[in-house]
Amino acid sequence: MSDTILDINKDNKEENVKLEVNNLNLFYGQFQALHNISMNIKANKITALIGPSGCGKSTFLKTLNRMNDLEENVSINGELKLDNTDIYKEMDALELRKRVGMVFQQPNPFPKTIYDNVAYGPRINGIKKKAQLDEIVERSLRQAAIWDELKDRLHKSALGLSGGQQQRLCIARTLAVEPEVVLMDEPTSALDPISTSKIEELANELKKKYTIVIVTHNMQQALRVADDTAFFLLGELIEFRDTKKLFSYPMDKRTEDYITGRFG
Ligand SMILES: Nc1ncnc2c1ncn2[C@@H]1O[C@H](COP(=O)(O)OP(=O)(O)OP(=O)(O)O)[C@@H](O)[C@H]1O
């Protein structure tokens, strides 16, 4: 890792750090997919992860809520802390995933009603009272900016919604268990421009309450929504800083080549 990135991480330390990553390495069998990643993800900010296909963005995102634990042959070393607690050594994976929710590339609602999709997580967590569930469903759909569109069809199947509506429903489902961090893996890549801009506006609104980490292939999207941007290449974190600075004055030649379209 370069000195440049260390300097930037020191700057970040002065702000409110939600997730602290130190010297993180991840292997799929013999293949090392992440090399010595260190970065601080700030609370109530949007952090974008960019870089060419296969550079480790999704792998890194998944380490933040231990989704890689589900895969065979994965080994991880280094330190990853949520609010100063090590998520691998000192935290139960289920507890962690309540605090760190995830939204995937393809909207993946359950084949259930809209209401039951949103109530799913709270029910698993033991909430049974209808009035309480009603309140959670409404709050979550409002936070996901889709209440007005769906309030009259809560008991219809979620599979009848458009792709953009399904994705906002999936965001509502994630918010229903009141996470602190929301991870988004290319959440708009399957959506049209109008749905994309709704999700971007929503992310901007949600950061008041949540910390958001988003993987995107779309550099304009990173520029539009992210406070900080991390550029990955071949499993290394090349540069990580304020988004506007990274795009205006890239410090590393490889970042410059990528954002100017010279490779990737
Ligand atoms: N389950 C796995 N087993 C083995 N290798 C994997 C696995 N998942 C990812 N990899 C490899 O790890 C590297 C990083 O993959 P990853 O999906 O994290 O990249 P990415 O930057 O998110 O790519 P994309 O933008 O195409 O989604 C790639 O070389 C990939 O082939």
Image (tube, helix red, strand yellow):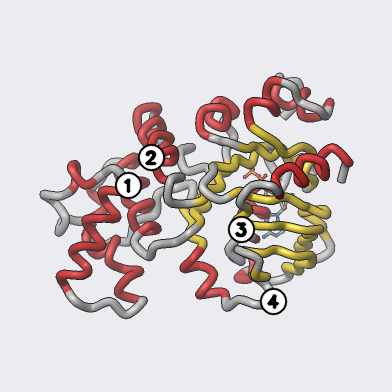
Can you give x and y, in whole percent of width and height, for residue 170 in the image? 36, 53
Q: Given the image, on which type of amino acid does mark 2 rest?
A: Leu
Q: Which residue is mark 4?
A: 89
- Find out whether the residues at labels 1 and 4 contact each other: C-beta distance under 8 Å: no
Residue 215 spot, x, y in % from top left: 58, 43
Give the x, y percent position of residue 256.
Answer: 77, 24
- As drawn, the label of residue 251 is none
Identify the residue at image location x=16%, y=72%. 130
Q: Secondary structure at mark 4?
A: loop
Nearest to the eye among marks 3 and 2: give it.
2
Mark toward the start of the polypeptide (3 vs 2): 3
Task: State how far apart marks 1 and 4 are (Cα).
Answer: 33 Å
Quick one: label 1 or label 4, which is nearer the N terminus?
4
Q: From the viewer's perspective, is 223 left or right of 59?
A: left
Q: Where does label 1 land, which residue?
A: 144
Q: Few, some or many C-alpha atoms within 10 Å of disc 2 (few <14, some 14-19, many ≥20)?
A: some
Check disc 3 and report the residue beneath it.
62
Residues at circles 1 and 3 in contact by the CB criterion of under 8 Å: no
Amino acid type of the residue that numbered disc 3 sits on in the rendered structure: Lys
Indicate yes or no: mark 3 CB to ligand 1 under 8 Å: yes
What residue sits right under mark 2 in the picture? Answer: 202
Element type where label 3 sits in the image: helix
Name the residue type under label 4: Lys
What whole-number distance in Å separates the C-alpha atoms at marks 2 and 1?
7 Å
Q: Residues within 10 Å of mark 4 (few under 14, many from 20)?
A: few
Q: Toward the viewer: 155 or 197?
A: 197
Q: Marks 3 and 4, how far apart in space?
A: 16 Å
